[in-house]
Amino acid sequence: MLVLSRHRDESIIIGDDIVVTVVDIRGDKVRLGIAAPIEISVHRQEVYEAIQRENRQASRLEPHDARQIDRVAQPVRRDVRRPRTDGA
């Protein structure tokens, strides 16, 4: 692991197009600003781990489970009758 020291408003660059800037330091908390291309996901570690857990769980679904999800996710079709405008 590379360990760097930075002051407020100083940055580090990762690769050619990711910039991490120290935005604020308050007590034992550091606020970071991250500029990265839109195709690169940036998450807090706990959010990333939750996404990974959800993806693993979804990949273990059995075909009959997926069919149940499809049934629940079907859009509800309503027969909406519009008032006639031809005077009848």
Image (cartoon, rainbow, N blue to C red):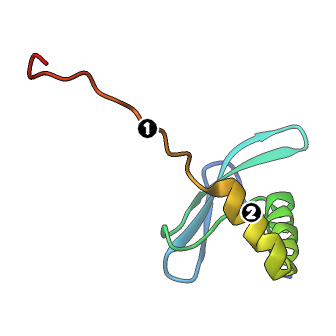
> How far from the left and from the top, in percent, is residue 57?
88, 73
Left or right position of 33 against 53: left
Q: Residue at x 71, y 55 (%)?
A: 72
Q: Residue at x 62, y 69 (%)?
A: 41
Left or right position of 2 against 82: right
> How far from the left and from the top, in percent, is residue 28?
91, 43
Residue 6, image quadrant: bottom right
Q: Amino acid at mark 2?
A: Ile
**Is residue 59 in view from this perspective?**
no
Q: Nearer the viewer, residue 24 or 78?
A: 78
> Mark 2 or mark 1, which has the lower sequence index?
2
> How far from the left and from the top, in percent, is residue 88?
13, 19
Please name the residue that numbered disc 2 is placed on.
69
The reply to whether dot 2 and dot 1 touch (C-beta < 8 Å) is: no
Within-10-Å neighbours for mark 1: few <14, some 14–19, many 20+: few
Within-10-Å neighbours for mark 2: few <14, some 14–19, many 20+: few
Which SS class for mark 2? Answer: helix
Q: Amino acid at mark 1?
A: Asp
Please name the residue that numbered disc 1 is placed on.
79
